[in-house]
């Protein structure tokens, strides 16, 4: 996931899932926080990002299905 920051607003500009993953949910912004949910056969990955002083700050949560 590539995120562009404009002041405190984040916007997803691209998502390129790893092999075996597909996009389930996609909130591209612009917003205070953006999110992409990816699914594979055994995992669920939730990737969120916000902007701090113009720099993306990501958070990733992996869970087994």
Image (spheres, helix red, strand yellow):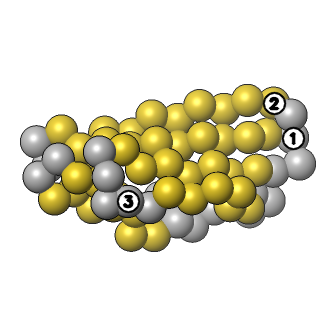
Residue displayed at 45% across by 34% down = 59
Q: Are marks 1 and 2 in contact (CB under 8 Å)?
A: yes
Mark 1 or mark 2: whose residue is earlier in sequence? 1
Residue 1 relative to residue 62: left or right: left
Q: Residue 7 carries which label?
A: none
Q: Residue 11's spot in the image, x, y percent?
A: 33, 61
Q: Which residue is drawn at 44% across and 61% down?
A: 28
Lower sequence index among marks 3 and 1? 3
Residue 55 seen: no
Residue 64: mark in rendering: 2
Residue at mark 1:
42
Q: Which residue is drawn at 73% across and 61% down?
A: 22
Residue 49, by quadrant, is top left
List the residue tagged with mark 3: 29
Residue 16 in percent (x, y) is at 57, 67
Mark 3 burial class by Cα count in 10 Å: few <14, some 14-19, many 20+: some
- In this picture, residue 28 sits left or right of residue 47: left
User: Label 3 to label 1, Cα distance in Å?
Assistant: 28 Å
């Amino acid at each position: 996931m590539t995120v562009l920051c404009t002041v405190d607003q984040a916007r997803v500009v691209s998502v390129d899932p790893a092999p075996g993953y597909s996009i389930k949910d996609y909130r591209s912004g612009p917003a205070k926080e953006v999110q992409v949910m990816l699914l594979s056969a055994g995992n669920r990955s939730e990737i969120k990002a916000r902007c701090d002083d113009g720099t993306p700050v990501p958070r990733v949560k992996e869970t087994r299905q």
